[in-house]
Image (spheres, rainbow, N blue to C red):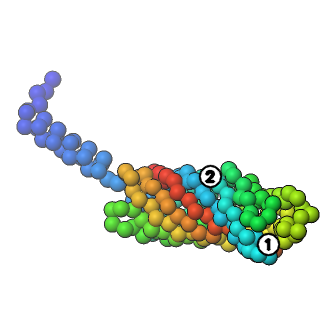
Amino acid sequence: MNKVTPRFLTSSLIALGLFSCAAFGQETPRSDKHYVGLLATAIEHRSIGQSDEDGWGQAATLVIGGHLSDLIHAEVRLGGGLADAEISRGDLSLAVDYFGSWYMGLHYPIGELGNVYAQAGFTHVSGEATLDNRDADANAQFRDTEGDYPSSSFSFSWLAGLDLELMDNTYLVFEGGKLFEDTDTSANAFQFSSGIRYEF
């Protein structure tokens, strides 16, 4: 067995240590990262009926996306309704059973705090409008809304938001924007969400 001199052994250990630190210290470029998120979403339904009534519902949203570059991202979202919206001045309730969205957007870092972002895309929504006491005069303006809601299930949508980095690759998200607009009835809905996103 050949004896290894202490000087060579020391040099090798130092070189190995430096290499290991460099390897672990290399961060994955953001353009190579993907992300998942889980959001609690409040949905505000506006311009319902001739008197432009409104109401609030609740949903949960799953976000799956990826960074195409340091500033551009694309994502899909799947959401499910948790609580129906009770519309003011009447007996109409709006249920969003599920929705799916596709977005492309831009994000811009704000120092080490996190990022601001804006994105636009398309959303498919499936839901139902239920009208109790249909013959009441107060409900006459909602009779055309009853049934499938929204009547036009695909719509342009957009949102803007802010994420704050809680720890490495984990962000607290706040955002809002338009979820859909029903071209048949002019009813529209806005989404306001907060939750957690993890990048990997």
Q: Nearer the viewer, mark 1 or mark 2?
A: 1
**Residue displayed at 17% across by 38% down:** 13
Give left or right: position of 75 versus 14. right
Give left or right: position of 123 versus 198. right
Give left or right: position of 183 versus 71. right
Judge by depth and name the residue closer to the eye, 120 or 163: 163
Q: Is residue 161 visible?
A: yes
- Residues at marks 1 and 2, CA–CA distance in whole angstroms: 26 Å
Horizontal and vertical percent for residue 56?
67, 61
Q: Which mark is residue 60?
A: 2
Horizontal and vertical percent for residue 185?
80, 73
Horizontal and vertical percent for residue 10?
11, 37
**Residue displayed at 37% across by 51% down:** 167
Judge by depth and name the residue closer to the eye, 95 or 26: 95
Q: Residues within 10 Å of mark 2 (few under 14, many from 20)?
A: some
Q: Check disc 2 and report its element: helix, strand or loop.
A: strand
Give left or right: position of 3 versus 194. left
Amino acid marked by disc 2 = Ala
Quadrant of res 85: bottom right
**Residue displayed at 39% across by 67% down:** 109
Circle 1 sits on which residue? 49
For the residues labelled 1 and 2, say whether their Cβ atoms are less than 8 Å apart: no
Judge by depth and name the residue closer to the eye, 140 or 106: 140
Image quarter where the N terminus lies is: top left
